Amino acid sequence: MLRRNFSKVMAATAAFSTLPRIGSAQEHFPDRQVRLVVGFPAGQSSDVGARIVAARLSEDLGQSVFVDNKPGASGIIAHEFVKKSAPDGYTLLLTSTAPLAINPFLFRNIPYNSAKDFTPIVLINTSPMYLVTAADSPFTSLRELVAFSKANPGKVSYGSSGSGTTGHIAMEMLKSKTGLDATHIPYKGSGALITDLIGGRVQAGFDAASSIAPLLSAGKVKALGTSGPKRSSRFPQVLTIAEQGVPNFQALTWAGLVGPAGMPSAVVEQLNAAVNRVLNNAQVQQHFANVGSTVNGGTSESFNQFVREELKLWGPAVKASGAQLD
């Protein structure tokens, strides 16, 4: 079933690359409030970022952009809702790594096609993850962790915030590339993972920069590497995974703006330009820098290409992990 799902999504990625042609473009968009659907609970880092962008976007567009939280089912509820909405630009979606690039390969029966059912608008931000261990752990590098695990089969475990999450799949990616011998321990959220990691009940784990940065600064955890393409300016002493002998290793968490499939090109272009202006705001950039993220922006076409590459990256990784959810 997983192989069949992977083939279907890969066959459809080309469809995601073509934006709709201009039909009867809305001449006065927007003339009423715009809904921004977020598939996470209020107060989470993704929701906070969405609200900051929405507030600035409201000022830019001259119409209210309000956040509508629809959490649950790993983002599936929010994505299905937007998929079924009118493609007029008045219902938008904050999407991210797991629901758009991992879920299609993870869930047996998913009610949306990432490559066909959404119109790409703009990539908002990207964030690395950190491979961390307890502050008093004997490991000081990825190489040491891998070497110990090989010499002591079955003695190393790693935690994640849940089966199929970015942290879980990223670690499986790392295992396949390094031979790391580690058993997966899934938790219900990042908080429980961090508690057990600090307590030494699991030896390592990948987690998002927004969760790890305060703990690194406080000396409560130790970073063995970052999954980003370059070192973080906030923690320049932390080597990338690629620098430690794993060529081309990259696993980012990210957020982007999409709408339902079939949006008029003129509306897509208007929204893209507006969000890019918002992302150039110094206060918006400072917010994302504070949580360890890089502001991106760019064209809808570049976001489209980014998503296609993410599908190619995460699909094989999910398959290799053996993770499968109903």
Image (tube, grey):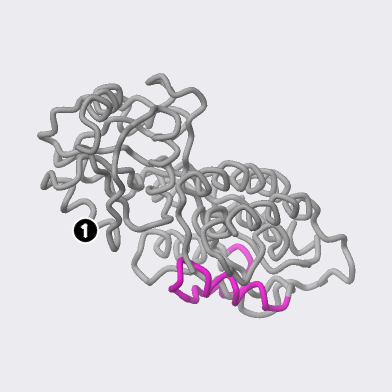
Number of other residues with Cα within 10 Å of mark 1, as a class: few under 14, some 14 to 19, many 20 or more: some
How many labels were placed on the picture? 1
Residue lying at 33% horizontally and 43% vertically, measured from the top left: 206
Residue lying at 68% horizontally and 55% vertically, measured from the top left: 9
Q: Quadrant of the N terminus?
A: bottom right
Give the residues in magenta.
60-86
Q: Position of residue 241 (x, y in %)?
A: 39, 28
Lateral position of residue 239 relative to residue 121, left or right:
left
Lateral position of residue 16 relative to residue 91, left or right:
right
Q: Amino acid at mark 1?
A: Ala
Residue lying at 87% horizontally and 62% vertically, measured from the top left: 22
As for residue 83 lying within the magenta part, the answer is yes
Lateral position of residue 299 relative to residue 155, left or right:
right
Lateral position of residue 264 relative to residue 89, left or right:
right
* Residue at numbered disc 1: 192
Q: Position of residue 275 (x, y in %)?
A: 60, 56
- Element at badge 1? helix
State the residue in front, 248 or 254: 248
- Toward the right, the furthest residue is 23
Placement of 246 over or under 58, stated as above or below: above
Q: Position of residue 160 (x, y in %)?
A: 31, 51
Q: Position of residue 287 (x, y in %)?
A: 39, 50
Question: On the image, which quarter does residue 292 sit in?
Answer: top left
As for residue 153 lying within the magenta part, the answer is no
Placement of 34 over or under 163, stated as above or below: below
